[in-house]
Each structure stands twice: as structure tokens, then as C-alpha cells.
Image: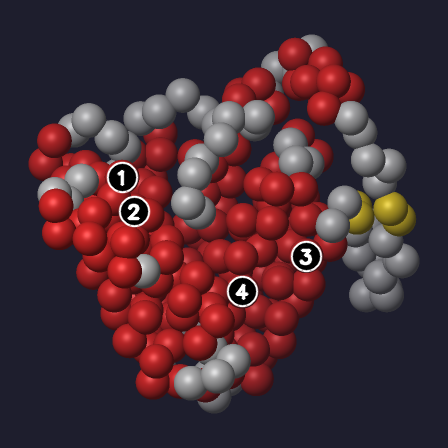
Amino acid sequence: MTLLDTLHALAPTFERENIHGSGFKRLAMLESAVNRDDEQKAIGQMLEHYGAAEKIARSTGVHPFFYPAMNRIAARLALADDAKPLDNDDITAVRGSMSSVPPDFWSVVGQTELDVFVSIAAGTLSQNVSHLIEDFRKHHARVSNPRMWDSIVDNATFVRSRYARHPDENERTAADRLLRELELLAGGVTPMPEESSGIRRAPTSRAKKSGKRIAKANRHSGSPLARHGSSKKNNR
């Protein structure tokens, strides 16, 4: 972090603020298992740097601002101890930023991640979790890159930390269920739909495809997500 502090002192930029925010996010995830106070301090720094990156993006118009905005929202959720709905205008603006770029994995799956954040903030995750899982499965059917899905799991794990303090058992159960489903998707396992009886069939492993086979399948797909799913996003 010392090197990042030095670079930041030279001149704050969109990229440096994002990298700095990402560093504090990782630090917070490490501290969560050791020291609650240090975890909260790291999240506070994460919030500050992603907020600064978002401000730069909004003011210059050079970069879409949804990436730092999503992390800013995640940091606020991780710091909060109670359910408080997110600002509707803020959510609309973030969705607009996602829609302003050519569709790729991050801007498309990000819409569902944002739905998760909205549900968490409002305390309605238990009501919406089944629908959210179904949306994630649809995304995974188009793009199954494990590295990309690992990033989605990391984000869910980070926000999940707030539920260690959540008084509502139904919300905690829903958060655990969502995280398990995302871990299955990241691990290359395709969960089967739930039976009408409520009993779930055992998931079946999906054979791993080589990069060439994925690329070939994507070229023949009409989905914008599939066409752009191989694009990279750094520092998530």
C-alpha cells in the first residue's frame, strides 16, 4: 500500500484511485478474519478512493463511472448495520453508465449485481433471491469464464460480511444461498433448476471448454454478453 500511496500523492487519476480502492478492498477482506476495527478502516479507505475515481469519471466523461460506483455502493453496504434503501437516482445513474458502453460481461452481469445490492440495502434479499439466482444462471449460460465469475464471488463475499451482524435470519439464509450458487457457477458447476416439490436435484459438473471452443461458441451466439464476454476488467 505504501507504493500506492506514493503514486497517489504524485497525481490522483481515475486508474490510480481505482487501484488504490481495490487494494483497500483486498485488505478489508483479509482483515475481516482478524480485526473488525481494521476491516472497517480499510473499507472506509476503499470507499474514499472509489468515490474519488467515480468523481473523476463523472467530471471528465472519459471513463464510464459504473465500476467505481459499484464498489462505492458495496463499501457502503459493508459498513452499514441496518437496512436502508439506496438512492433511486443514484441507482438509475449507475444503470445508465452500464448501458452507455458496448455490452460486455461486466456491464451486463453488473446489472444483476446492482439488483443484489438494491435488495440487500432494502432488506428484501430473501424475497428476491430466487429471481436473482435465475438471472445469474442465464448469464453463466452465455459466458462461463471462471476468472470472471470468481470476481462476482469476491464481490458477493465482500458484501456478505454485513450479514454476520444482520438480525434477520431469513436475510442471512438468502445471502448464504446466493453465495453458494455463485461459487458453484464460478467452479464450473451448473446447478439444476429446483423441482416443484422444493427438493433440489444434485448439480452436474459442466465439462470445461478450451478457450478456442468458448470463442467459437461466442462467435455464433447472437447475445451481446456472449460476444463481449471475453473482454477484461482490471482490479475488480
Distance from the alpha carbon under mark 3 to that under mark 2: 25 Å
* Residue hosting label 1: 15
Residue ID at (28%, 54%):
3
Inspect the image, locate mark 1, and give the three-letter code of the amino acid beneath it: Glu
Distance from the alpha carbon under mark 3 to that under mark 1: 29 Å
* Residue 109 relative to residue 67: left or right: right
Distance from the alpha carbon under mark 4 to that under mark 3: 10 Å
Inspect the image, locate mark 3, and give the three-letter code of the amino acid beneath it: Glu
In primary-sequence order, the first of circles 3 and 1 is 1
> Which of the 4 image quadrants contains residue 120?
bottom left
Q: Is residue 96 above or below residue 162?
A: above
* Residue 114 relative to residue 126: left or right: left
* Residue 81 relative to residue 212: left or right: left
Q: Pointer 4: residues within 10 angstroms few (<14), some, or many (20+)?
A: some
Verify CB contact (< 8 Å) between mark 1 and mark 2: yes
Residue ID at (45%, 42%):
110
Inspect the image, locate mark 2, and give the three-letter code of the amino acid beneath it: Asn
Q: Residue 183 carries which label?
A: 3
Tell me if residue 92 can be seen: no
* Residue hosting label 2: 18
* Residue hosting label 4: 157
* Residue 92 relative to residue 223: left or right: left
In primary-sequence order, the first of circles 3 and 2 is 2
Give the image location of residue 128, x and y in percent: 54, 60
Distance from the alpha carbon under mark 1 to that under mark 4: 24 Å
Q: In this view, does 20 lie above or below 29?
A: above
